[in-house]
Image (tube, helix red, strand yellow):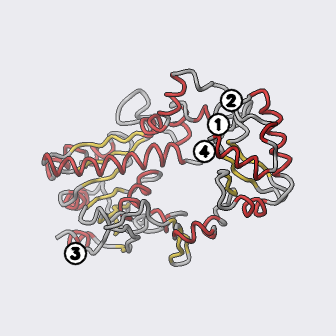
Amino acid sequence: MSTTKTGPLAGCRIVEFDAIGPVPLAGMILSDLGADIVRIGRPGKAGVDAPGDKILLRGRNKIALDLKDPEQRDQAMALVSKADALLEGTRPGVMERLGLGPEDCFAHNPKLAYGRMTGWGQEGPLSQSAGHDLDYIAITGALGAMGRKGEPPSPPLNLVGDYGGGTMFLALGIVSAILSARTTGKGQVVDAAMTDGAAVLMSMFYAFHDVGMWKAEREANLLDGGTPFYRCYETADGGYMAVGALEPQFFAVLLEKLEIDAADFPQYDRARWGDMVTAFETRFASRTRDEWAAHFEGSDACVAPVLSIAEAPAHPHNVARQTFAERDGTMHPMPAPRFSGTPAAIGNSSDLDIEEALALWE
C-alpha cells in the first residue's frame, strides 16, 4: 500500500507513540505538512477518546499495541525500522525499559531521528519529577514576567511551555535531524525539553534585561502591559480592544482615530502615562467592541477586537484566508504555514491493525 499525502514533508515516515500535551500537536503539524504518521496507542486508547482528539489526532493512521508484551513490542519496532523519525513523550527511562529506547531503535534503524519530548529534559535534577507547562515556564523567567502588577503571575494557557517551548522545538528538531540523517547517514536523539524551548522563546527579553531595558516588576515594561499603547481596553459592552501601537507613526494614527490631541500625550513621556491610560479607557468605554472594530478597520493604528474562540473563525480576515474550516462538525485551525509549491493539507485518519500499518510502508 502507498500513501498519497501532499505537502513539503510528503514521503517522510514517522512513528508517534501515545503521549499528551506537545507530542500530539507536533504529530498533527508534521502530518499537516505531509508526513505519513502511524500513531501507536495503548489498547483501548488508539482512537479518538478525549476532548480535542478530533483535532489533535487528525491526519494519522492509528494502531493499538501493548508495548509491555514482547511480541507487540517487536511489532512496534518493525514499524520503527521503516521510519524516518520517532516521537515519544514518556518520562526519561521508560522507553529504555520497554526495549524501545534510542540504542534499541538505532540497532534496527541507524538513520532514525529519535524525538524525545519532556518538560525538564532527559537529565538534570528535575528530570524524574512530575510537572506541567506552568511549572516548566516558571523556572525560565517567562511566567514571572506575565500578569498584572501586584497579583500572581497569569498562566498563558499552555502556549508557552507545552506548545511554544515544546511542540515547536520538537517539530523543528525532528525535521532538522531527518535532514542531517539524509546527509550523514546517521540518526540521532532530539532531546526537546520545554524548559529549554521556553528559555529560547525568552531570548529578546533576556537581551532587554542585559542592557537594563527590562524591569523585574510586572507592568513596568514595553510589552507586559506597562505602556498605555500596548494593552487591552474594555468597551461599552464589556468587550475588549487590543492596542499595540508601539511605533510613533502608528501611535499617531491611534490618537487620531481616538480623537485625542497628540500634543497632550507625547508617546514616551512616562509622567503622562497614567493620564493617557485614563483617556484611552474613557474613549474605548464610549462605544461597543464591534463599533470600535469597524472604526479602526484597515487603519495603521494597530488595534484589533479581542475575539472569543467561538467568534474567531467568523472574522472576515480569517474567513478570507481560510484560517479555520469545519470538518465533520468540528471547527479546525487549518495547516500553517502556507507553501506555494507543496501545499499542506489535513490528511485522512484510519484505525489499523499492525499488518495494515506495516503494509502502508512497503
Q: Are marks 1 and 3 in contact (CB under 8 Å)?
A: no
Mark 4 and mark 3 lie on one chain; the one further toward the N terminus is 3
The spot of residue 131 in percent (x, y) is: 50, 39
Rendered image: mark on residue 156: 4
Among the 4 quarters of the image, the one containing residue 278? top right
Rendered image: mark on residue 224: 1
What residue would you read off at disc 2? 220
Secondary structure of the residue carrying tag 1 is loop
The amino acid type found where label 4 is placed reads Pro
Rendered image: mark on residue 129: none
Secondary structure of the residue carrying tag 4 is loop
The spot of residue 307 in percent (x, y) is: 68, 60
Q: In the drawing, does residue 259 fall left or right of residue 224?
A: right
The spot of residue 226 in percent (x, y) is: 70, 34
Disc 1 to disc 3, how far (Cα)?
50 Å
Secondary structure of the residue carrying tag 2 is loop
The one nearer the camera, 68 or 52, is 52
The spot of residue 222 in percent (x, y) is: 63, 34
Q: Which residue occupies 30% across, 56% down?
A: 67
Which image quarter holds the C terminus? bottom left
The amino acid type found where label 2 is placed reads Ala
Disc 4 to disc 1, how far (Cα)?
12 Å
Q: Are marks 4 and 3 in contact (CB under 8 Å)?
A: no
Q: Is residue 339 above or below residue 145?
A: below
What residue would you read off at disc 3? 2
Secondary structure of the residue carrying tag 3 is loop
Mark 1 and mark 3 lie on one chain; the one further toward the N terminus is 3
Disc 2 to disc 1, how far (Cα)?
7 Å
